[in-house]
């Protein structure tokens, strides 16, 4: 697309012309008074503007928590919607300070594209959605199918691998955003839509008749999704990482938005006290106020609360905790200790 | 004594660089150039330094690595294990395909609209004016999306063609328009196929040669030869002779149909009805296989017609193989249950029996028809929906501009020319062809060159509809998956530069050929 060539060229020049942003992100964000956060173009439950035009969702909540920790105000966030293609350029060029957009932590993104994944907020895998009327019950029956995929994602590479490994053919229809993919899929221009399972569930929830579509049982990849920042500014990376860890640990220790004011007065659990700033100087070590995590937790509650509110079983998206339960409940969510 | 006075030899002084108007402009240009170079060098240096800070360098080594992604429209063989360079090349070819189709169509549309806009017929002229204004004034991206969305929303999905009583039937049993694209038959050359094509092309050349000769004769001797029917005869007769000759000789040689042991002796129809379908081993590019497939598809269509209750859905499949030996091997392995082979060969194949029905070898050109198998249509040629949307949108958009160029070119020829030609007794058509257009062409061509360039560059909007041009492969997926933005964009810029310069060069040669020759 001509526009994106231009955008990339501008980004390239921006890399060329801008003074390097390494090691000063915190300062820049504080001076600006606003956190620039890269999110989806719109995926209900993860990141989408609500009826009032306010961004909300599971990924958006991470941005808000970081903004609250750094600036004390969860609404001081400028959301920049990015596609699978533009998210990395946006981060590399400094247009955004962090990305929280269903992004899979992979070797090349970490080491070759030079980004730093600060953790994992959703353990996911790639799946397939087909219309029920197609009568397909397994991904191995998809030989010859036309498949809608978002470009610039791990999805398109996994898909190629999966079909090659199973010695099947397919016809890829590359698409830029989830909204377009949905339109094409519903019009029958492709037989199958493939992306992360969570994305499929979120997309299906917005259909008029969600029951007419099935998710196939095969999960063909590991997609650990998490927020990311640029390589080279470890201080900033640490802030985002420990904000996320704080959200996860808070669930483990039972810190919720309901009892946080009370717990912030001080408790007899030293770990909670260290997290909430009544003991030790963890905020200062990060270069933040001592109540940084209190603010972050007040923004949207702990990890479990955020999950339930946006994508949990009580929402139309209806995702079970599964792998994303706390380690104490047999899941993989496990924050390193605040010590 | 000499009458001329030697003018004093002018000394060049440094101050003249500023004070003397002859030198001043050079001075400023040199300074400007110097500043520009300095600025570029600064940007380049900054880029390299910042990339180094990010821990990145500029390297094209990624081009050799496996691309890892698939491309839907492949003019050359490509799979996801091929290199990024090959993926980029596939993209380049796709760009060239849509640019070529677009330029040709835009020229035809533009010429017609441009000429008709000057028509004396009020309605025609206004219609063309409306076309030009509507298309010139709406961005081309919008047109691309409109056409694409109309196609996906209005046309049926391939599944609508499925079953014994489908919602949709194929046009002439050979073409299908779906929301994934239009499927048309693919020509397969049979016996004498090449000769037929060669003779036909020679006939086309012959028609031109004949008309040239007739014109020359007319100018030289004043004798006017008829043009219409001899042209037609030159075009049709030789091809027809070749066609009939081969159809009746080598083409009508009978082939045996091989089926598994025990099923022999019956007719093809009985066999297929008994089996509920057939899987044909289809030798790529062999007309005998195409004939067998056509026969199967005809049976399938017949089984679907008639009263709804009696309809049967025959399950026809093909198993494509490279050669006849491979087909025989596949047949013996049971990968298909039908195979067309020459009678002599049938005797040598141990496994299987032959049917009573025999089929001919094929005419010089047989049509390999698309048919629904599984999720999609197989065989034939698929003109993808994304290609159609991009091609049509670019063509009608650019056509509107070309129409204006054509109109301007024609209107630039003074009316006196038309009147003078008319007073010589020339008919309006001849006035246009012999007097106006040759002169107008000189004015029309240069702006049309830049329209071609525009169209080619606009084709980079392809990704909006998922057409995998070079911006989609090299500048899209490759750039994204490797993160090599600067390298990819540089290569992309180089490609568009080369292609633009080539188009200009070719068109300039053409322009020189029609230019006013001053002697
Ligand atoms: N996890 C994959 C895929 C990410 C992705 O593109 N996900 C889709 C669906 S889950 C999405 O977020 N789309 C929203 C949009 O188009 O903005 C990756 O990181 O490459």
Image: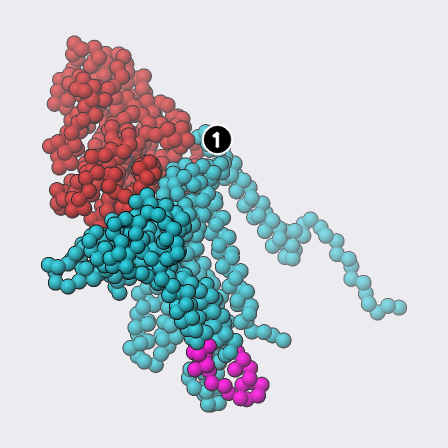
- Chain containing the residue with disc 1: B
Taking the view exactly as shown, the residue that stands out farthest to the right is B1
Residue B149 makes an appearance in the image? no
- Location of residue B417 in the rendering, given as x and y in whole percent from the top left corner: 48, 83
- Chain B tint in image: cyan
Which chain gets the red colouring? Answer: A
Residue at x 23%, y 22% (from the top left corner):
A332
Q: Which residue is mark 1?
A: B52
What colour scheme does the image use? by chain
- Location of residue B196 in the rendering, given as x and y in whole percent from the top left corner: 44, 67
Residue at x 21%, y 32% (from the top left corner):
A58
Q: Is residue B367 left or right of residue B192?
A: left
Q: Quadrant of residue A263?
A: top left
Helix, strand or loop for disc 1 = helix
User: In which of the image's four quarters is ligand 1 placed?
Assistant: top left
Q: Nearer the viewer, residue B432 or B288?
A: B288
Report crowding for label 1: few under 14, some 14 to 19, many 20 or more residues within 10 A (C-alpha). Answer: few
Residue at x 43%, y 86% (from the top left corner):
B427
Residue B196 makes an appearance in the image? yes
Residue B250 sits inside the magenta stretch: no
- Give the answer, above or below, for where B93 lies relative to B102: above
- Give the answer, above or below, for where A274 lies relative to B332: above
Some atom of ligand 1 lies within 8 Å of the CB belonging to the residue at label 1: no
Secondary structure mostly taken by the magenta-highlighted segment of the chain = helix
- Location of residue B349 in the rendering, given as x and y in whole percent from the top left corner: 36, 49
Q: Which residues are magenta?
A: B212-234
Q: Quadrant of residue A130?
A: top left
Q: Quadrant of residue A94?
A: top left
């Amino acid at each position: 697309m001509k526009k994106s060539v231009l955008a990339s060229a501008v980004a390239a020049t921006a890399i060329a012309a801008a003074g390097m942003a390494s090691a000063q992100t915190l300062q820049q964000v504080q001076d600006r008074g606003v956190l620039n956060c890269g999110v989806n173009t719109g995926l209900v439950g993860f990141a989408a503007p609500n009826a009032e035009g306010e961004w909300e969702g599971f990924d958006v909540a991470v941005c808000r928590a970081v903004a609250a920790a750094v600036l004390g105000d969860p609404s001081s966030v400028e959301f920049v919607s990015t596609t699978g293609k533009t998210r990395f350029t946006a981060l590399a060029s400094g247009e955004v300070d962090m990305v929280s957009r269903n992004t899979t932590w992979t070797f090349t993104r970490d080491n070759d594209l030079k980004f730093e994944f600060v953790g994992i907020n959703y353990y996911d895998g790639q799946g397939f959605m087909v219309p029920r009327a197609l009568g397909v019950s397994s991904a191995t029956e998809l030989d010859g199918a036309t498949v809608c995929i978002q470009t610039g994602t791990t999805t398109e590479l996994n898909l190629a691998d999966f079909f090659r490994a199973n010695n099947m053919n397919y016809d890829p229809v590359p698409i830029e955003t989830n909204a377009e993919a949905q339109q094409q899929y519903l019009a029958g221009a492709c037989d199958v839509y493939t992306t992360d399972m969570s994305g499929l569930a979120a997309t299906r929830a917005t259909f008029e008749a969600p029951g007419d579509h099935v998710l196939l049982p095969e999960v063909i990849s590991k997609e650990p999704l998490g927020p990311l920042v640029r390589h080279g500014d470890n201080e900033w990376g640490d802030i985002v990482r420990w904000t996320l860890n704080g959200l996860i640990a808070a669930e483990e220790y039972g810190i919720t938005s309901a009892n946080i004011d009370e717990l912030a007065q001080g408790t007899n659990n030293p770990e909670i006290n260290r997290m909430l700033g009544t003991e030790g100087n963890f905020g200062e070590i990060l270069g933040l106020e001592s109540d940084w995590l209190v603010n972050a937790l007040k923004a949207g509650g702990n990890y479990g609360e955020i999950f339930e509110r946006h994508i949990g079983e009580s929402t139309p998206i209806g995702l079970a905790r599964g792998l994303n339960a706390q380690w104490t409940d047999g899941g993989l969510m496990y924050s390193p200790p605040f010590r | 004594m000499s009458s001329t006075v030697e003018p004093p030899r002018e000394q060049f002084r440094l101050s003249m660089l500023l004070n003397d108007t002859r030198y001043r402009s050079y001075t400023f240009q040199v300074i400007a150039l110097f500043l520009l170079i300095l600025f570029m060098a600064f940007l380049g240096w900054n880029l390299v330094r910042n990339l180094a800070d990010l821990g990145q360098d500029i390297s094209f080594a990624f081009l050799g690595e496996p691309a890892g992604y698939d491309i839907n429209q492949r003019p050359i063989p490509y799979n996801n294990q091929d290199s990024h360079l090959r993926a980029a090349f596939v993209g380049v070819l796709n760009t060239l395909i849509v640019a070529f189709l677009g330029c040709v169509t835009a020229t035809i549309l533009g010429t017609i609209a441009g000429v008709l806009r000057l028509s004396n017929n009020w309605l025609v002229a206004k219609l063309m004016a409306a076309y030009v204004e509507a298309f010139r004034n709406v961005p081309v991206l919008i047109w691309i999306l409109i056409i694409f969305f109309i196609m996906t929303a209005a046309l049926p999905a391939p599944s609508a063609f499925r079953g014994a009583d489908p919602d949709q039937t194929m046009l002439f049993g050979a073409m299908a328009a779906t929301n994934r694209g239009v499927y048309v038959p693919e020509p397969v050359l049979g016996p004498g196929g090449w000769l037929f094509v060669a003779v036909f092309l020679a006939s086309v050349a012959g028609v031109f040669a004949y008309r040239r000769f007739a014109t020359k004769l007319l100018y030289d001797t004043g004798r006017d030869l008829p043009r219409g029917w001899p042209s037609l005869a030159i075009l049709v007769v030789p091809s027809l002779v070749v066609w009939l000759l081969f159809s009746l000789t080598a083409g009508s040689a009978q082939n045996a149909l091989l089926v598994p042991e025990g099923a022999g002796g019956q007719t093809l129809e009985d066999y297929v009805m008994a089996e509920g379908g057939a899987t044909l081993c289809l030798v790529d590019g062999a007309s005998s296989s195409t004939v067998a497939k056509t026969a199967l598809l005809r049976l399938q269509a017949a089984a679907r017609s008639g009263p709804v209750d009696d309809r049967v859905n025959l399950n026809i499949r093909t198993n494509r193989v490279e050669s006849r030996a491979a087909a025989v091997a596949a047949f013996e392995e049971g990968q298909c249950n039908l195979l067309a082979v020459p009678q002599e060969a049938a005797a040598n194949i141990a496994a299987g029996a032959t049917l009573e029905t025999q089929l001919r070898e094929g005419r010089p050109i047989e049509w390999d028809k698309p048919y629904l198998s599984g999720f999609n249509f197989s065989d034939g040629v698929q003109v993808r929906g994304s290609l159609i949307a991009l091609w049509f949108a670019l063509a009608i958009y650019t056509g509107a501009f070309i129409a204006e160029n054509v109109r301007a070119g024609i209107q630039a020829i003074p009316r006196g020319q038309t009147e003078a030609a008319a007073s010589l007794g020339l008919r309006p058509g001849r006035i246009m062809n012999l007097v106006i257009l040759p002169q107008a062409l000189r004015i029309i061509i240069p702006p049309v060159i830049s329209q071609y360039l525009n169209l080619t560059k606009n084709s980079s909007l392809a990704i909006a509809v998922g057409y995998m041009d070079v911006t989609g492969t090299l500048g899209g997926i490759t750039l994204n998956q490797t993160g090599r933005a600067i390298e990819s964009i540089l290569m992309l810029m180089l490609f568009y530069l080369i292609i633009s310069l080539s188009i200009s060069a070719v068109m300039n040669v053409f322009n020189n050929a029609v230019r006013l020759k001053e002697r």
